[in-house]
Amino acid sequence: MLKFMRNKIVGIERIAPDEVLVHGILDDDIYSLEIDLRVRLSDLRIVSIDGRWKRWTTPECPLAVGKLKEAVGMCINEEGIYEKIRREIGKKSCRHFANLLIECCDSVKLAKEVIKEKEEVKEKKKVDIRKEFPKCVKNSGTLIDLHIHTYPASPCASSSIDDQIEEAKRIGLDAICITDHDYIWDKEKIEELCKKHNFLVLRGAEITTDQGDILVFGLEKLPQKKGLISIRELRKEVEKSNGFMIAAHPFRGFLISDIESLGLTPEKEAEREVFKFVDAIEVLNGRVNANENVFTKKVAEICDLPKTGGSDAHETKEVGIYATYFEDEIRNERDLIDALRSRRYSACILKGV
Ligand SMILES: [Zn+2]
Ligand SMILES: [Zn+2]
């Protein structure tokens, strides 16, 4: 029995918002060839094309590669395009290249449909952070950005504590909490800064635990522990000092792709160990995307834990993106902890993102 095998494979990659790179291979018992073309998605025009022969039969075959350029500028969506490709490319270049190019064009049209559908779904899923959280309106209470880093105490930050304080003052915050990574500022140094800037600066720390980052308030020194501290141990230390613990950005990076595809639900995530050990949850974090912040808010509601907001500013322009509005007046660190316990506060958008 006569046997003949032909394989055509097309791969498509979106290399820019409006452009795809198409790689096509045609391989049969006689010929083997490849093409690469770029197609603009908005008008489906061929932007560039290149070809390669891997196996051919006549000395003329390789000449066909140069003639492929005739396809540049063609709109693959126009009527009669496949006849045109057969006529122009098939005759001037080679019918095998024409055959493969038609397969590629067909695939691009399908890919465009898929991309469109995906974008529509994504658009529908995009949450509007402004509908979920209030814009901050200052009344008699105290507006505080509870999560701020400074350089060099946090090596990953780029702004000095003086710059962060000045920015906080400029944008109308009443106070900030310095929460450097695994670092607690000296009390005297902070008092000096308060006087120097005539502004309330409070101390906290962001401590890395086996259950993620935790914002801690009320500790005078870091727990003495070699290696990663467990949340249980940290809880003990904080209780000894009558302090307060907030789970910082507990879902950062969780919802970069589709929520459903990861099977995450707020109900399931609310059962995480970490939420049994903290007093509140940071539901607005400036370095977390809108979907993740809204997801965290739902989790906090299920856990019945109070919700805080903070910028997680590592540089000056980020200070005050989000904040926490306390209904009470806060004048010092003890007031802050009492206020945090009172639950009379809400996470709010200040500068926004
Ligand atoms: Zn963190
Ligand atoms: Zn942080």
Image (cartoon, rainbow, N blue to C red):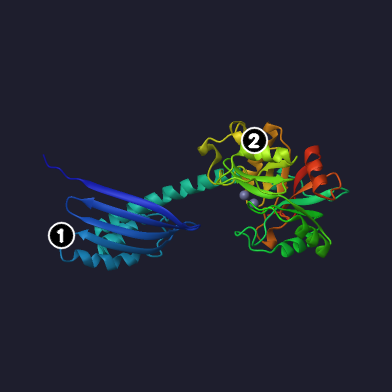
Compare residues 23 and 328 and report the one nearer the observer.
Answer: 328
Looking at the rendered structure, the secondary structure element under dot 1 is loop
Residue occupying the point 23% across, 67% down: 63
Residue occupying the point 51% across, 45% down: 118
Q: Nearer the viewer, mark 2 or mark 1?
A: 2
Looking at the rendered structure, the secondary structure element under dot 2 is helix
* Amino acid at pointer 1: Thr
Q: Which mark is residue 275?
A: 2
Left or right: 274, with 102 as reference point: right
Tell me, yes or no, if residue 343 can be seen here.
Answer: no
Please provide percent x and percent y for residue 55. 19, 58
Report crowding for label 2: few under 14, some 14 to 19, many 20 or more residues within 10 A (C-alpha).
Answer: many
Please provide percent x and percent y for residue 16. 48, 59
Left or right: 202, with 295 as reference point: right
Report crowding for label 1: few under 14, some 14 to 19, many 20 or more residues within 10 A (C-alpha).
Answer: few
Up-down: is 189 above or below 206? below
Up-down: is 11 above or below 155? above
N-term mark: 2 or 1? 1
Compare residues 330 and 234 and report the one nearer the observer.
Answer: 234
Residue occupying the point 64% across, 40% down: 234
Please provide percent x and percent y for residue 186. 73, 56
Q: Which mark is residue 304?
A: none
Report the quarter where the N terminus lies: top left
Q: Which mark is residue 57?
A: 1
Left or right: 60, with 232 as reference point: left
Residue occupying the point 62% across, 36% down: 232
Compare residues 334 and 285 and report the one nearer the observer.
Answer: 334
Report the quarter where the C terminus lies: bottom right
* Amino acid at pointer 2: Phe
